[in-house]
C-alpha cells in the first residue's frame, strides 16, 4: 500500500511491539523506496513481518511515528474521522466535554497532535511533520463529528509554537486557522468561570489536565486558610474560593498570569476572599515561615522542573525544597496537595522525594489520595510519555 518500507534491525522495535508508537533512528536497518519527510511508510520487522504504517522524518531521532497496525487500510479522510469519532465518544463517557482535551496525541492514536476544545473554540498544537500534513483534514473531521452532537465551532487557533518543532525541522508558528475571532474565551469548570486566552496563554491557553484534581481539593477548603503556589491564572485558588474558603492567597512569578487570576476572581465574585501576589515561590515560602504564617491547606502545582533525563537530579532538589517549605507552613492536621507534571519525574522518584521532604520538615504524612491527569488526557499503557501528572493529597502531622 505504501511503497517506502522502513525495516527494523533484528532485536529492535521492542517498544513498538509492546504497544508503543515510536521508532528511533538507531532501531532502523534500512529505508527502501523514494519518500519525502512527512510521508507515510510501511514499517517491517527484520524478517519482513508487517508491523504497521507510520510517517517518517529522518531529521528527527524519533524517525517514525506509528499511525496504524492494520494492514491494507489506507490513512485517508475516513481513517482520520474514525480516529476522531472514537476519541470524542470516549470523552463523552468519562468527562464534562464543555471544555476538554479532545485529541491527546499517541493516546488517541494520532501521534504528534493535541486538540483542546474550549466551549466553541478549538486550539491545535502540531509537533510532528507527518501529522502536520494531516492537520487540516483532522480538524475538518473534528468539526463534522462535533456537528453531529449540535456543537458548532466558531473558531480555530493554532499554538504550534513549542521548541520541539525545531527538532522536526519545522518552524514554530501560531495564528488563526480560518476566519479570525475573539481569542478570549469564557469557560466554566467545576462551577468556576475563567477567561481563557487561547492566543497568549501558556500552552493551549489553560491547563485542562488538573480538572478533577481541582475539584478534589474543594472538600478540604471550606472555612480554611489556603495557600496556592504557582497559581498561574488562579485555578486551584478559585476552586478553594468557590468551595467556601475563608481566605486564599495565590502566588505566581508571572505578572501576566496574576493579572488574569485577578480577572478570574472578579468574574466569580471572589475578590473579597481570594487574593493574588506576584512573587517567586522559592523566595516567598521562607519569608512566610519566618513571619510565623500558617495555613490549613497548601497547594503546590509547579511547572515541570525537568523536561529531560539529564536534568532530573536538579529537579529533585527543587521538588524537595518546595515540599519542605510547604509542609512547614501547614498547621498540624492540615492538608498538602502536591504534584509533578514532568514525565521524567517518575511516580517512584516523586514519591521518594516527597518522603525525603517530610523527613526534612519533621512532619508525618497521611495519604488521602493519589491521582493522575484527567481522563481526557488518557494514559496509554506502553505509551510512557502519556503518563506525566502525579498528584497527591496528604494530611500533614507534626511528629509525635
Image: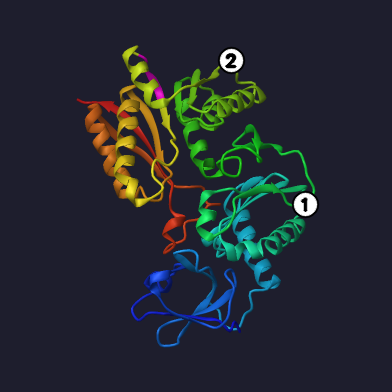
Q: Which residue is pictured at 41% across the width and 88% down the height? A: 47
Q: Which residue is pictured at 77% across the width and 42% down the height? A: 181
**Which quadrant of the rendered structure holds the N terminus?**
bottom right
Instruction: Determine which quarter of the picture holds residue 297.
Output: top left
Please tell me whether mark 1 sits on a helix, a strand or a loop.
loop
In the displayed structure, would residue 220 be above or below residue 17?
Answer: above
Q: Which residue is pictured at 59% across the width and 36% down the height? A: 190
Q: Is any atom of residue 222 visible in this view?
A: no
Q: Residues within 10 Å of mark 2 (few under 14, many from 20)?
A: few
In this rendering, the count of numbered labels is 2
Q: In the image, is residue 294 part of the stretch drawn in magenta? A: yes
Foreground pick, 195 / 44 = 44
Q: Is any atom of residue 359 visible in this view?
A: yes
Q: Which residue is pictured at 38% across the width and 44% down the height? A: 306
Alpha-carbon distance for marks 1 and 2? 41 Å
In the displayed structure, would residue 4 be above or below residue 310?
Answer: below
Please tell me whether mark 2 sits on a helix, a strand or a loop.
loop
Magenta residues, start to end: 293-297
Disc nearer the start of the sequence (1/2):
1
Residue where numbered disc 1 is placed = 178
Q: Which numbered tag is attached to residue 141?
A: none
Q: Is residue 333 left or right of residue 61?
A: left
Residue where numbered disc 2 is placed = 272
Foreground pick, 250 / 147 = 250
Main SS category, magenta section? strand
**Which quadrant of the rendered structure holds the C terminus?**
top left
Q: Residues within 10 Å of mark 1 (few under 14, many from 20)?
A: few
Amino acid at each position: 500500500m505504501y511503497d517506502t518500507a522502513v525495516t527494523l534491525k533484528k532485536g529492535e522495535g521492542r517498544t513498538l511491539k509492546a504497544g508503543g508508537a515510536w521508532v528511533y533512528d538507531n532501531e532502523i536497518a534500512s529505508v527502501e523506496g523514494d519518500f519525502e519527510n512527512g510521508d507515510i511508510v510501511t514499517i517491517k520487522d527484520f524478517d519482513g513481518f508487517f508491523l504497521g504504517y507510520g510517517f517518517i522524518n529522518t531529521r528527527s531521532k524519533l524517525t517514525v511515528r506509528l499511525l496504524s497496525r492494520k494492514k491494507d487500510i489506507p490513512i485517508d479522510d475516513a481513517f482520520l474521522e474514525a480516529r476522531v469519532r472514537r476519541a470524542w465518544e470516549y470523552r463523552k463517557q468519562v468527562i464534562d466535554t464543555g471544555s476538554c482535551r479532545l485529541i491527546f496525541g499517541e493516546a488517541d492514536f494520532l501521534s504528534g497532535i493535541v486538540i483542546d476544545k474550549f466551549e466553541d473554540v478549538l486550539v491545535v498544537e502540531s509537533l510532528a511533520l507527518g501529522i502536520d500534513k494531516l492537520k487540516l483534514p483532522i480538524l475538518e473531521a473534528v468539526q463534522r463529528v462535533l456537528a453531529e452532537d449540535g456543537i458548532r465551532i466558531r473558531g480555530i487557533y493554532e499554538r504550534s509554537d513549542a521548541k520541539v518543532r525545531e527538532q522536526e525541522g519545522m518552524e514554530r508558528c501560531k495564528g488563526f486557522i480560518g476566519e479570525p475571532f475573539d481569542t478570549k474565551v469564557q469557560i466554566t469548570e467545576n462551577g468556576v468561570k475563567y477567561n481563557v486566552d487561547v492566543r497568549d496563554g501558556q500552552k493551549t491557553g489553560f491547563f485542562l489536565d488538573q480538572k478533577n484534581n481541582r475539584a478534589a481539593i474543594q472538600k478540604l477548603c471550606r472555612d480554611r486558610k489556603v495557600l496556592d503556589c504557582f497559581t498561574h491564572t488562579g485555578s486551584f485558588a478559585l476552586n478553594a474560593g468557590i468551595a467556601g474558603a475563608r481566605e486564599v492567597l495565590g502566588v505566581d512569578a508571572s505578572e501576566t498570569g496574576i493579572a488574569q487570576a485577578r480577572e478570574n476572581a472578579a468574574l466569580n465574585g471572589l475578590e473579597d476572599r481570594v487574593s493574588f501576589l506576584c512573587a517567586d515561590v522559592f523566595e516567598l515560602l521562607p519569608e512566610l515561615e519566618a513571619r510565623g504564617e500558617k495555613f490549613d491547606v497548601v497547594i503546590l502545582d509547579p511547572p515541570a522542573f525537568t523536561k529531560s533525563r539529564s536534568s532530573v537530579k536538579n529537579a529533585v532538589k527543587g521538588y524537595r525544597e518546595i515540599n519542605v517549605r510547604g509542609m512547614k507552613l501547614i498547621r498540624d492536621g492540615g492538608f498538602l496537595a502536591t504534584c509533578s507534571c514532568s514525565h521524567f519525574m517518575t511516580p517512584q522518584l516523586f514519591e521518594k522525594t516527597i518522603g525525603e521532604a517530610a523527613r526534612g520538615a519533621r512532619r508525618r504524612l497521611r495519604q488521602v489520595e493519589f491521582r493522575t491527569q484527567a481522563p481526557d488526557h488518557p494514559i496509554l499503557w506502553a505509551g510512557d510519555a502519556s503518563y506525566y501528572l502525579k498528584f497527591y493529597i496528604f494530611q500533614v502531622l507534626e511528629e509525635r
